[in-house]
Every structure is written in C-alpha cells, then in structure tokens.
Amino acid sequence: MTVEPKPIRTEADYELALEEMRKLWGAQPGSPQQDRLGVWATLVDDYESQNFPIDKPDPIDAIRFRMEQAG
C-alpha cells in the first residue's frame, strides 16, 4: 500500500514517514519513487528541525573539541 505524503504533525505520522522512506530507499534516479522519497525526506527534515533542534556549539568548545580530535 502506498501512503500519500502529508504534513507530519504527530510521532505516529513521523514513524509512518520514516517507514515510507525505508521502502523507497535506493529508488532509481529520476523515477517517481525517488521523487516520493524526496518529498518524504523534506517533510521529515522539517519535522525534525521543529521537534529535535540541535543547538549550535559554543565557539570555544568547538575549537577545543577540534584540537582534541587533531591530537
């Protein structure tokens, strides 16, 4: 069964969208399936941005982290 893309408003909508993306993953470039995957990905990105925001790091902490990673 194909689910039509729609706005993601709830956790259940989000889970459904992720499942649809899993089904469409690996679609042939230029195919309708790839287009649907792109629409779902855009909707998921918007939902995640609103509900799971990632704070920007403190600049000094970012520099320290990078220095630690570099050795």
Image (tube, helix red, strand yellow):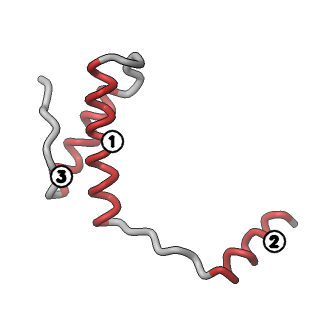
Which x, y percent locates residue 70? 84, 63
Which quadrant of the rendered structure holds the N terminus? top left
Neighbor class of circle 1 (other Cα within 10 Å; few <14, some 14-19, many 20+) is some
Rendering quarter of residue 35: top left
Q: Residue at x 15, y 49 (%)?
A: 7
Q: Residue at x 60, y 82 (%)?
A: 58
Disc 3 target residue: 8
| Number of residue marks | 3
In the image, 44 versus 68, the foreground residue is 44
Which quadrant of the rendered structure holds the C terminus? bottom right
Which x, y percent locates residue 4? 12, 33
Secondary structure type for disc 1: helix
Q: Is residue 62 left or right of residue 45?
A: right
Kind of residue sitting beneath label 2: Met
In the image, 26 versus 12, the foreground residue is 26
Kind of residue sitting beneath label 1: Ala
Q: Could you tell me how far apart the alpha carbons at marks 2 and 3 are, in whole angstroms?
A: 39 Å
Disc 2 target residue: 67
Which dot, 2 or 1, sits closer to the camera?
1
Marks 1 and 3, the one that precedes in the sequence: 3
Q: Residue at x 18, y 52 (%)?
A: 8
Q: Could you tell me how far apart the alpha carbons at marks 1 and 3 are, in whole angstroms?
A: 11 Å
Q: Is residue 25 left or right of residue 15?
A: right
Kind of residue sitting beneath label 3: Ile
Residue 41's label in the rendered image is 1
Residue 69's label in the rendered image is none
